[in-house]
């Protein structure tokens, strides 16, 4: 695996090239290639996740001195969630370097998004180990922090399920419930339709590649229908 061009793209010249290679190795690949010589990226991901959260927390704390903890937590969640991380990973061309099992390589659904997000965190962990916190912070501030204004203006930091529950309890005195209406597709590429109910009333439905995504989309649609945005 030649990652020279990738290093140029992220402007990090690794001293330990094997560390960067390890960041791209999924557990499933090692299961099929037990004599590969390197292990999977899960420990790097664990480390990178912590580094990412610390740098983003520090950035938000300083950027928004008047914001309460709840807002800062919502901003951070939107900046470091799987969708954001997977999007950055794709923009940097990480997908083409993934080492996956034959089965995982065929999956282009929601599972691939999580794999890409984990690889990005593993790369951050590798940068931290190889270059230190300053370089890791530089990488994160280059690729993550410019997204915050778009996230806030689009309202994508808002947890639709939490907001809909808050509004339903305020206006109707009822905690909403969610029920899976339909599942379709093969196991590696499932699609879900979930309904959100207030009492016995079906307020809205949402689709997604996981039940959690479908619930969020149902809550967004319900907020719109109720005029509670």
Image (cartoon, helix red, strand yellow):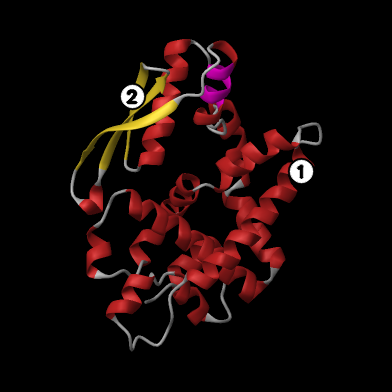
Residue that label 2 marks: 205
Residue 12 seen anywhere in this rendered image of the structure: no
Q: Is residue 36 above or below residue 221?
A: below
Residue 165 included in the magenta stretch of the image: yes
In the image, which is nearer the foreground, mark 1 or mark 2?
2
Residue 91 included in the magenta stretch of the image: no
Q: Earlier in the sequence, mark 1 or mark 2?
A: 1
Name the residue located 40 percent from the left edge and 88 percent from the top edge.
37
The quadrant the N terminus occupies is bottom left
Name the residue located 43 percent from the left edge and 27 percent from the top edge.
177
Name the residue located 30 percent from the left edge and 82 percent from the top edge.
33
Q: Residues within 10 Å of mark 1 (few under 14, many from 20)?
A: some
Q: Quadrant of residue 53?
A: bottom right
Is 102 placed left or right of 173 in the picture?
left
What is the distance, in whole Å, between disc 1 and disc 2 at their CAs? 36 Å
Residue that label 1 marks: 61
Which structural element holds mark 1? helix
Q: Quadrant of residue 49?
A: bottom right
Q: Which residues are magenta?
A: 163-169
Which structural element holds mark 2? strand
Q: Quadrant of residue 67?
A: top right
Is 105 placed left or right of 94 in the picture?
left
Query: What x and y, as percent, mark residue 191?
Result: 26, 40
Q: Is residue 168 above or below residue 35?
A: above
Towards the viewer: 185 or 144: 185
**Marking on residue 220:** none
Query: What x and y, as percent, mark residue 225?
Result: 42, 12
Q: How many marks?
A: 2
Name the residue located 61 percent from the left edge and 33 percent from the top edge.
149
Query: What x and y, as percent, mark residue 112?
Result: 34, 55
């Amino acid at each position: 695996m030649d990652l020279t061009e990738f290093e140029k793209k992220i402007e990090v010249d690794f001293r330990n090239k094997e560390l960067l290679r390890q960041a791209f190795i999924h557990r499933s690949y090692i299961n099929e290639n037990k004599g590969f010589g390197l292990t999977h990226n899960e420990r790097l991901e664990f480390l990178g996740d912590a580094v990412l959260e610390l740098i983003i927390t520090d950035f938000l704390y300083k950027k928004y001195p008047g914001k309460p903890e709840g807002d800062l937590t919502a901003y951070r969640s939107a900046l470091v969630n799987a969708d954001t991380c997977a999007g950055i990973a794709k923009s940097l061309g990480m997908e083409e370097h993934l080492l996956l099992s034959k089965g995982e390589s065929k999956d282009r659904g929601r599972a691939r998004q999580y794999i890409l997000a984990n690889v990005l965190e593993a790369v951050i962990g590798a940068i931290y180990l190889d270059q230190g916190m300053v370089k890791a912070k530089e990488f994160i501030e280059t690729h993550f922090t410019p997204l915050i204004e778009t996230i806030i203006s689009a309202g994508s930091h808002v947890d639709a399920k939490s907001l809909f529950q808050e509004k339903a309890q305020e206006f109707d005195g009822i905690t909403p419930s969610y029920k899976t209406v339909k599942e379709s597709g093969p196991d590696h590429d499932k699609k879900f339709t979930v309904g959100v109910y207030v009492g016995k009333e079906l307020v809205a439905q949402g689709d997604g590649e996981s039940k959690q995504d479908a619930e969020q989309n149902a809550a967004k649609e319900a907020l719109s229908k109720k005029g509670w945005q």
